[in-house]
Image (cartoon, rainbow, N blue to C red):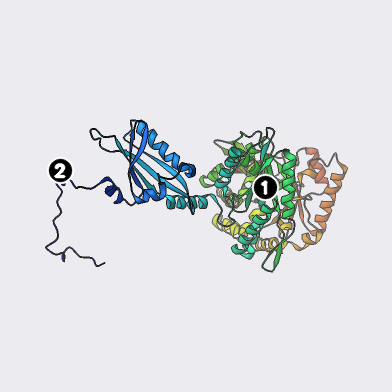
Amino acid sequence: MESTSMRDRPDDMPKVELLPGVDDAHPVHPVTMSEWLAALPHPSATFSFENNILSVVAINSSFRRYFDPTMDEAVKPAHAAEWRNRIVQYVQSARDSESFELRRDGVLGPEYFHCTLGRLPELEGRPNLFLFTALDRTSDRAIEKNLRRELLSDGLTALPNRTGFGEEIDDRLRNTPWPDNAQFGIIAIDLSRFSRVNESLGPMAGDELLITVAKRLKSSLRQGDVLARIGGNDFAVFARLNNGLSDALHIVQRIRDALSYPIRLSDLQIRVDCAIGCALSLSLSEDPDDVVRKAQAAVKIAKRSGKVEIYRNGVLKEAQRRFSVESRLRDALAQGGLTLAFQPLIHLQTGEITGFEALARWNDDELGDVSPTEFIAVAEESGLITPLGRWAAYEAAQALSRWDAKFGQPLPVGVNVNLSPIQMARDDVASMFEEALRYSGISGNRLTAELTESAIVADPEKAKKLLFALKDLHMPIAMDDFGTGYSNLASLHSLPIDILKIDRSFVSSMLEDRDKEIMVRTILSLAESLGLHVTAEGIETQQLAHALQNLGCWQGQGYYFARPMAEADAFDYWRARWNFETV
């Protein structure tokens, strides 16, 4: 259709003018009620109600097609009585208008109508008339249903998502008969090593793996159980439990059996490992969301233990505590809320301070003093260990730089910085230390990297490349907690390690435990043959310090010498012992 611009509009356009009144706007047209209704495209009708009898006055063809009032009472569908009853209720009320939704069974499925009722002007000597209209909303409801299905389901596996899972549970609890002694359980399933599949084979292979796992899980469940995908690689099962924990464990075994044989992806066969946690409701009235959270708390423990975990009282509080610690730690890292404490390293033969070990400390306004054991574990689990490790390295190097400036020349001490195995796997550690040294202006031989045996065992080749990169920066390397891991002589000989730190579990009780003393002697002998220095941790008495001194141990640290202290106190401590002090 061609458009006409305002400039080209013809002069003989009809004049449009609104009349001032409403009642007398147009002359009365001799149009019947039926003719008025026939002009409406949707089902419409007028009714009268007199002597408690509802009568049809006029209808249009659309109304006849959907709401035939002449149909025999014996074959009328259920909706026929519903709209009649709604009209009678409205007529008997004092309301001017009313609307309601009506559902009827059509040839292609359910049909939905938005119905309205209104009173027509009263005519003297005639019964009151009422206008009924019905707008077909079937297509709208179908669109709403499809959108709702998309919102409540996972697009990849077609399983319910987290929101849909909650609605499925509510529906089962409301509309399914339950025995008096019945309860329900939630089984949470976390696919282990799923991220490696994505990284190695690509996201398409990861999607294929999830689809296959979903099919296997569904095939292992009983009728009435609900399977959902509630996260990236997290699934959950809602199960009715007539026999409590035994039913739940039976389902768990079926799940493990279903995932026990490998899945073929491309030309590879991949074994799917999973962590499973269970939570059982105390009663059918318990909030399902709470039970889901309990199951997820249990599965987190299962990821660490490698076993099926059943939720215990207090586990959810522990999970909530970890969440609070993670949230507050994230803020603390962003806002400079952590500090470094420094514990002296003492030369056992001369009593001189050879350096300090830098240890992260955190006092939070809401949580108070948080143990390093707690917040470092949370940092490793949440991925915050990378920024935490970088902060510690930069801050330790800057502390040395500040001490040098205060003393007027470089101090003859260094600082040891701990490396997490997870940080080594995820971060460019060599680049981190190079930046820390460059920004602070100190030499590499004053910053010692401490790593554990487990960090080397996890990926020996990657660890070897990292250690040689650190040696290029002239940094000493210490193996922490030596004796508790799985290192062998070949790895010690091939890696550029300078210091072995004997774990405190051997040192602290070596005077009372003959086996521990033999272990300490063996490590000292091994280090001597390999040309390595040895540091003993956990020295808490003078007797223990003298025993290690007599065994020829190079260096020690522990509460006997000093507890970890603030940066300024550490400098004063070094200055007070600078010249000499015997052990």
Relative image position of residue 380 (x, y in whole percent): 64, 49
Q: Residue furthest bottom?
A: 267
- Give the residue at mark 1: 223
Q: In the rendered view of the protein, which quadrant contains the C terminus?
A: top right
Q: In the image, is residue 291 above or below residue 458? A: above
Near mark 2 (Cα within 10 A), the count class, few <14, some 14-19 or many ≥20, is few
User: Is 505 on the left or on the right of 565, as rendered?
Assistant: right
Task: Indicate the secondary structure of the residue bearing disc 1.
Answer: loop
Identify the mark at residue 24; answer none if there is no mark: 2
Give x and y (percent) for residue 33: 27, 45
Q: Which quadrant would residue 532 be assigned to in this image? A: bottom right
Report if residue 359 is visible in the image. no
Residue 182: percent from the left, percent from the top?
68, 36
Q: Earlier in the sequence, mark 2 or mark 1?
A: 2
Q: Residues within 10 Å of mark 1 (few under 14, many from 20)?
A: few
Kindly identify the residue that appears in the image at 16 percent across and 66 percent down: 8
Q: Quadrant of the N terminus?
A: bottom left
- The front one of 516 and 240 is 240
The structure residue drawn at horizontal position 72% and vertical position 57%, both measured from the top left corner, is 458
Q: Nearer the viewer, residue 16 or 63?
A: 63
Q: Nearer the viewer, mark 2 or mark 1?
A: 2
Q: Amino acid at mark 1?
A: Gln
Q: Residue 250: in sight, yes or no? A: yes
Instruction: Tell whether label 1 touches label 2 (CB within 8 Å).
Output: no
Amino acid carrying mark 2 in the image: Asp
Q: Position of residue 346 (x, y in %)?
A: 72, 46
Residue reaching furthest left?
11
Report the side of 91 relative to 554 (left or right). left
Marks 2/1: CA distance? 70 Å
